[in-house]
């Protein structure tokens, strides 16, 4: 498929981006969920004795050995429910806004349009995904009392109110907006380097996505640690700091610094990078695959329709000539 076919056909159909984005989001989160659970555990500031880990393999092995083989995937259903619609909105908004802001058909080679489109798409994505993140992270924590997503959701709703699901929303945006700006600009730059023709190239999409995700994850880890604290509201930390709850980015940041110093902002850095790198590689690969597949289907349907119209026109002209 040529560049014009691959890049321009989707502009005619937002559904293409939504279906591809939903598939990419669900696939990414499901495949990488166990590592995401490890990351959440390793970002804990005051872990219980049984929840202290020296490395990613150590955390994963202890979770399986002491809590069961399925412990690393507890809470996955919350992410599946949220990731589908969130990523559908995310990718469709990005593709549409990238072209609208840049004023060009493809919206490529324009870091400003890519960055702005990424910011606006992130605002839409996080508005759907944030409640799922709260439920997911509370279920991922060591000694979590919750076994089912509905149980966790109802408990938070009844005891902390609806606001609890968006307590970390501004922090999430503070992290994800720069993350997505760096992510999208890096991805588009890597596409220029590895895929100059901008055709469907699985290896180029995978490499570009992996590099973009790893780099963006590394520079935004401090904000991710703050977000995790706001979502989990660690009971042991609240007791030692004599706070009823952690609320807001500044409160979270100062609490982390007073508790662990500067190194506290980089807890779980390795796990976050290792989670995001393959995660974004999978996400972009699946997204581009479905995008290309749907485009081929549309192209085939268009070609068939054109052939039929041409044949009908030819027959009509033949009859007119006979008459």
Image (spheres, rainbow, N blue to C red):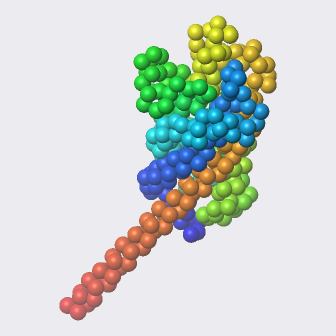
The number of numbered discs placed on residues in the rendered structure image is 0
Extreme residue toward the left, this view: 323
- Which residue is rendered at x = 69% and y = 53% of the image? 208
Residue placed most toward the observer, 197 or 168: 168
Task: Establish if 199 lies above or below 239.
Answer: below
Q: Position of residue 202 (x, y in %)?
A: 63, 62
Does the image show residue 321? Answer: yes
Q: Position of residue 6 (x, y in %)?
A: 55, 63
Does the image show residue 97? Answer: no
Extreme residue toward the bottom, this view: 322
Q: Position of residue 140 (x, y in %)?
A: 58, 32
Task: Establish if 190 lies above or below 54.
Answer: below
- Which residue is rendered at x = 60% and y = 28% of the image? 141
Can you say which quadrant of the picture contains the N terminus?
bottom right
Can you say which quadrant of the picture contains the C terminus?
bottom left
Image quadrant assignment for residue 69? top right
Residue placed most toward the observer, 69 or 27: 69
Residue placed most toward the observer, 184 or 81: 81
- Which residue is rendered at x = 34% and y = 77% of the image? 308
Seen in the image, is 154 located left or right of residue 320? right
Q: Position of residue 304 (x, y in %)?
A: 39, 74
- Which residue is rendered at x = 23% and y = 92% of the image? 322
Residue placed most toward the observer, 157 or 286: 157
Extreme residue toward the right, this view: 262
């Amino acid at each position: 498929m040529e560049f014009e076919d691959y890049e321009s056909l989707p502009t005619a159909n937002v559904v293409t981006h939504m279906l591809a984005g939903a598939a990419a989001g669900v696939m990414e989160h499901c495949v990488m969920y166990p590592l995401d659970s490890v990351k959440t555990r390793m970002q804990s500031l005051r872990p219980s004795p049984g929840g202290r880990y020296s490395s990613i393999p150590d955390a994963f092995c202890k979770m399986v050995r002491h809590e069961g083989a399925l412990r690393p995937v507890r809470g996955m259903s919350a992410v599946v429910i949220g990731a589908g619609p969130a990523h559908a909105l995310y990718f469709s908004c990005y593709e549409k806004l990238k072209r609208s802001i840049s004023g060009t058909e493809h919206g490529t080679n324009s870091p400003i349009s890519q960055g702005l489109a990424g910011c606006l798409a992130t605002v839409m994505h996080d508005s759907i995904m944030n409640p799922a993140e709260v439920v997911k992270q509370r279920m991922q924590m060591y000694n979590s009392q919750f076994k089912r997503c509905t149980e966790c959701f109802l408990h938070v709703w009844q005891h902390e109110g609806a606001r609890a699901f968006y307590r970390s929303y501004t922090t999430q945006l503070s992290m994800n907006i720069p993350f997505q700006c760096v992510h999208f600009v890096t991805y588009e730059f890597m596409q220029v380097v590895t895929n100059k023709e901008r055709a469907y190239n699985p290896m180029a999409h995978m490499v570009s996505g992996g590099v973009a995700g790893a780099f963006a994850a590394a520079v935004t880890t401090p904000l991710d640690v703050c977000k995790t604290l706001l979502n989990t509201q660690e009971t042991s930390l609240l007791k030692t700091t004599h706070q009823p709850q952690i609320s807001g980015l500044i409160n979270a940041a100062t609490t982390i610094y007073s508790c662990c110093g500067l190194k506290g902002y980089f807890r779980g850095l390795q796990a976050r990078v290792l989670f995001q790198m393959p995660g974004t590689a999978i996400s972009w690969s699946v997204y581009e695959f479905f995008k290309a597949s749907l485009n081929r289907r549309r192209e085939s349907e268009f070609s068939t329709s054109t052939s039929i119209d041409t044949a009908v026109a030819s027959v009509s002209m033949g009859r007119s000539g006979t008459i």
